[in-house]
């Protein structure tokens, strides 16, 4: 074995070996109980980011462990066609050649996108392999492949036939740059400092006016009412009266509606049904006109009168100027608010009325809510259920059409002769209403989320009744960040229940977001984003995986620090050195992968086997509760502090005894084997490499999960360890060379000391018991561990007078330090004026000085 752990050298060879062995396929355990996870499909345009690294590491530790536990474990991979993202990428490539998609035409452009996918669309899957993620690549899917496309068409047609998909004019998010409707997840909201414009709306008859406040004064051109809350006494007499719309002199009514917030602005709101979702709903309830004053280019339409043709932001200033000029502007206040931007191009999104396709969600949300309430699907942590319920209960109809060329075509056609709309899974030849053959296909495509919501069952072959669908659906767990509970998880729940009758997953394990050490969001624009592949290059994939899984507390954000990955690499080196020592110096080799445990272990062996059994049981409990950070923190500490720092050292003694060596060698082999198995899901490359040195030639990836039996270990081990630590400290404090033997006598009133202690006190602390349980005279030091006391004659070890002088000087120096700190703390001016951390620092000095004085005094008293 090499002398040091080299991640790059190890991680370059094992993945192909695993794949060739079929280690990632559920068929590796043909008789196992099914367990399945479908990967949240990353965009085909994407590259691996830290969020992916966390999310996929969690999934990989789950699936690798289940595989080792004998389950027929399927982790199904795939990518999302990512409509708007992919189209933008290809359009940018075309722009470099000086052409646009319109130059190519729709059919040729779509061919170009497929060509791009074939050459550049597999980057993220290659990165997943680099990270060691053990998905079953033989089942890889793409949201735009033929099987999934058929599922999309069937779902669309079925929902349409049930009246749950319709085409209508409703408010949508529109990107004037990308020229398409956007889903909510494609809109990024940013807090901005804007302006709240207060406008006077005069009554059409009589004196007086109502003041309304708006952040978008340009939309007033499309107002068709002013609304107030029915319980607002300020406007009780105004309801039903008419107002004159400033600048355009159109009469609009005052209506009472419970959708108005009493506390916002003046309590009266302008109603623009064509440019605001709440206003649209108010307009629906009161039968108001819908006047569109901003077009798809974000310019004012002819309905905007003298402002026609102006950009929306130019019009904003022009409208304000005219309002002021004509006496309608009351005031402008600074206002902090959230503004939606297109996630792809950064353009401010424009809410507008548009003819689009929608899913009627209310009939679908009820069953999805019930499935969580009755336990068919559970959120971990449970607190996320409330967020899910709140969103489901307030969900608006979902706009599913997009004005793009790349995506699933909407399976709808329009008869040129009679105007009939035909929705079908396959292209019709004639119109069923008039039998005309001139049919025009709908030009829009479906929102990317429409296909990804079918992912858990469409990837298994639905609507065909496949073996995979029967075996692996519903899936066992969905692992995802809290940020897409609403956009993806909720929709998968609705569609899974509606089309299969079952919740698509039993557990929904929610993790947080990767943040900077000070808690800020990582982003390219902020310049603080980390590339996981850069970290892999510096530290290795395994160290990155281990550092992420140790931070993966359910539902909590991860304030990632690169030092964590460096620490994990150092742990890998510790593991490497421990195995190398065992293999090369203790001759621990050819350990059977599924071998047992020694029948007659010595006391040291029994102790470590007892601890191994307890740690494994606790690890499994924590793991099954999705408490990955706690589970691997427990295992990390056991391996480092107990198995390596104690047992590996203690084992050297019985290994020199021919009688005891076989049991200790078997114990050490079993402990190291089980540690490699337990760590394998998190650090697969390193553990597989080490197993190739320690084991029987089999693959660790396909080995069985450890289930060590409980063993009655010696109860006195912790006292022995405590005594060894204290004796080592005595040696260090008195500057006694490790080569100098120390004779001790033990006082053991409770009968804790066992005969096997002696060899370990000699080996680990350099101490020999000379008169067991008998005290000797002369200058004596005492070390206490529980009820056991070790008396150490100082003659020949320490120059008593020189030690006395040293201790007295140290006591004097410490008392001086203590006096200075106490003087400062007794000064009221110091306490009043000094920063709190400075005062706390002095208090800490006092506590440390008092502790040191007590320790020095005890050492001085022992000299006699």
Image (spheres, rainbow, N blue to C red):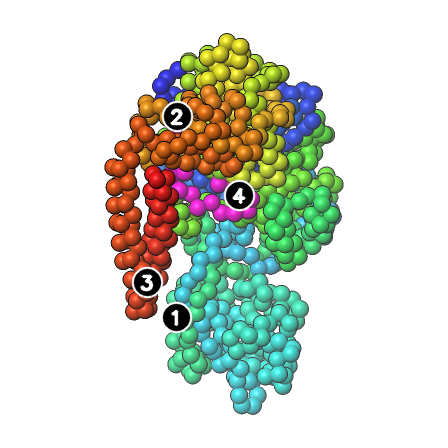
> Which is closer to the viewer, label 3 or label 1?
3
Tell me how far mark 3 sits from mark 4, CA to CA: 41 Å
Crowd class of label 2 (few under 14; some 14 to 19; many from 20; radius 10 Å): some
**Residue nearer the viewer, 754 or 457:** 754
682 displayed left or right of 288: left
Crowd class of label 1 (few under 14; some 14 to 19; many from 20; radius 10 Å): few
> Which is closer to the viewer, label 4 or label 1?
4
Asked whether disc 4 touches disc 1, contact meaning CB atoms under 8 Å apart, the reply is no
**Residue nearer the viewer, 585 or 197:** 585
Q: Which residues are magenta?
A: 551-572
Q: Position of residue 679 (x, y in %)?
A: 51, 28
Among the 4 quarters of the image, the one containing residue 28: top right
Tell me how far mark 1 sits from mark 2, CA to CA: 92 Å
Tell me how far mark 3 sits from mark 2, CA to CA: 46 Å
Numbered circles on residues, count: 4
Q: Report which residue position mark 1 lands on.
A: 317
Compared to 659, does 844 lie above or below? below
> Which is closer to the viewer, label 1 or label 2?
2
Tell me how far mark 3 sits from mark 1, CA to CA: 62 Å
> Which is closer to the viewer, label 3 or label 4?
3
Quarter containing the N terminus? top left
């Amino acid at each position: 074995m090499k002398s040091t752990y080299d991640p790059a050298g190890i991680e370059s060879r094992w993945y192909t070996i695993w794949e060739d062995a079929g280690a990632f396929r559920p068929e590796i355990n043909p008789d196992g109980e099914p367990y399945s996870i479908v990967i949240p499909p990353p965009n085909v345009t994407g590259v691996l980011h830290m969020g992916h690294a966390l999310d996929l590491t969690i999934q990989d530790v789950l699936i690798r462990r289940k595989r080792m536990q004998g389950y027929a474990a399927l982790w199904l991979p795939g990518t999302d066609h990512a409509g708007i993202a992919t189209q933008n990428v290809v359009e940018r490539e075309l722009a470099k050649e000086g052409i646009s998609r319109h130059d190519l035409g729709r059919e040729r452009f779509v061919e170009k996108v497929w060509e791009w996918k074939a050459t550049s669309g597999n980057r993220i899957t290659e990165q997943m392999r680099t990270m060691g993620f053990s998905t079953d690549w033989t089942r890889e899917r793409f949201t735009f492949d033929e099987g999934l496309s058929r599922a999309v068409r069937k779902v669309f047609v079925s929902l349409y036939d049930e009246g749950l998909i319709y085409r209508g004019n409703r408010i949508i998010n529109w990107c004037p740059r990308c020229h398409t409707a956007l889903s909510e997840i494609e809109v990024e909201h940013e807090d901005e400092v804007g302006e709240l414009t207060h406008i006077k709306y005069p009554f059409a008859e009589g004196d007086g006016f109502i003041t309304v406040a708006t952040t978008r004064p340009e939309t007033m051109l499309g107002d068709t009412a002013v609304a107030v809350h029915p319980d607002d006494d300020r406007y009780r007499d105004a309801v039903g009266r008419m107002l004159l719309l400033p600048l355009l002199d159109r009469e609009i009514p005052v209506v009472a509606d419970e959708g108005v917030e009493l506390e916002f602005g003046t309590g009266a709101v302008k109603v623009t049904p064509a440019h605001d979702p709440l206003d649209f709903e108010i307009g629906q309830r009161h039968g108001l006109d819908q006047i569109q004053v901003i077009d798809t280019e974000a310019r004012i339409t002819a309905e905007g009168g003298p402002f026609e043709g102006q950009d929306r932001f130019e019009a904003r200033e022009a409208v304000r100027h005219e309002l002021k000029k004509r006496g309608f502007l009351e005031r402008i206040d600074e206002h902090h608010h959230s503004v939606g931007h297109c996630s792809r191009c950064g353009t401010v999104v424009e809410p507008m009325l548009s003819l689009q396709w929608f899913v009627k969600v209310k009939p679908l949300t009820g069953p999805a809510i019930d499935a969580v309430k009755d336990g068919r699907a559970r959120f971990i942590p449970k607190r996320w259920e409330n967020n899910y319920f709140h969103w489901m209960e307030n969900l608006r109809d979902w706009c599913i059409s997009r004005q793009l060329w790349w995506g699933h075509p909407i399976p709808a056609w329009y008869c040129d002769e009679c105007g009939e709309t035909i929705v079908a899974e396959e292209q019709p030849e004639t119109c069923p209403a008039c039998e005309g053959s001139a049919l025009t296909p709908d030009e829009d495509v479906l929102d990317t989320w429409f296909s990804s919501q079918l992912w858990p069952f469409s990837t298994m072959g639905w609507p065909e009744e496949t073996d995979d669908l029967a075996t692996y659906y519903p899936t066992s767990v969905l692992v995802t960040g809290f940020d897409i509970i609403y956009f993806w998880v909720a929709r998968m729940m609705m569609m899974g229940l509606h089309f299969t009758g079952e919740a698509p997953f039993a557990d929904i394990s929610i993790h947080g977001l990767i943040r900077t050490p000070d808690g800020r969001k990582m982003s390219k624009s902020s310049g603080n984003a980390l590339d996981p592949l850069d970290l892999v290059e510096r530290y290795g994939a395994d160290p990155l995986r281990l550092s992420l899984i140790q931070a993966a507390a359910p539902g909590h954000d991860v304030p990632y620090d690169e030092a964590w990955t460096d620490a994990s690499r150092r742990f890998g080196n510790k593991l490497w050195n421990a195995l190398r020592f065992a293999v090369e110096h203790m001759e621990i080799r050819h350990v059977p992968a599924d071998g047992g445990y020694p029948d007659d272990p010595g006391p040291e062996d029994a102790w470590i086997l007892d601890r191994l059994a307890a740690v494994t049981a606790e690890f499994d409990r924590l793991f099954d509760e999705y408490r990955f950070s706690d589970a691997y923190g427990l295992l990390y500490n056991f391996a480092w502090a107990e198995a390596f720092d104690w047992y590996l050292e203690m084992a050297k003694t019985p290994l020199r005894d021919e009688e005891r060596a076989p049991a200790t060698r078997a114990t050490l082999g079993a402990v190291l084997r089980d540690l490699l198995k337990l760590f394998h899901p998190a650090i697969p490359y390193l553990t597989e490499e080490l197993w190739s040195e320690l084991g029987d030639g089999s693959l660790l990836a396909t080995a069985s999960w450890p289930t060590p039996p409980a063993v009655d270990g010696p109860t006195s081990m912790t006292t022995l360890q405590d005594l060894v630590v204290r004796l080592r400290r005595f040696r260090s404090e008195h500057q006694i060379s490790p080569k100098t033997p120390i004779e001790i006598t033990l006082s053991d009133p409770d009968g804790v000391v066992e005969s096997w202690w002696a060899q370990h006190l000699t080996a680990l602390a350099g101490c020999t018991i000379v008169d067991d349980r008998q005290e000797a005279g002369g200058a004596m030091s005492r070390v206490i561990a529980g009820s056991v006391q070790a008396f150490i004659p100082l003659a020949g070890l320490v120059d008593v007078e020189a030690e006395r002088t040293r201790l007295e000087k140290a006591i004097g120096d410490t008392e001086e330090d203590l006096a200075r700190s106490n003087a400062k703390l007794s000064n009221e001016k110091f306490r009043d004026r000094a920063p709190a951390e400075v005062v706390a620092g002095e208090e800490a000095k006092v506590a440390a000085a008092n502790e040191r004085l007590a320790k020095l005094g005890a050492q001085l008293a022992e000299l006699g």
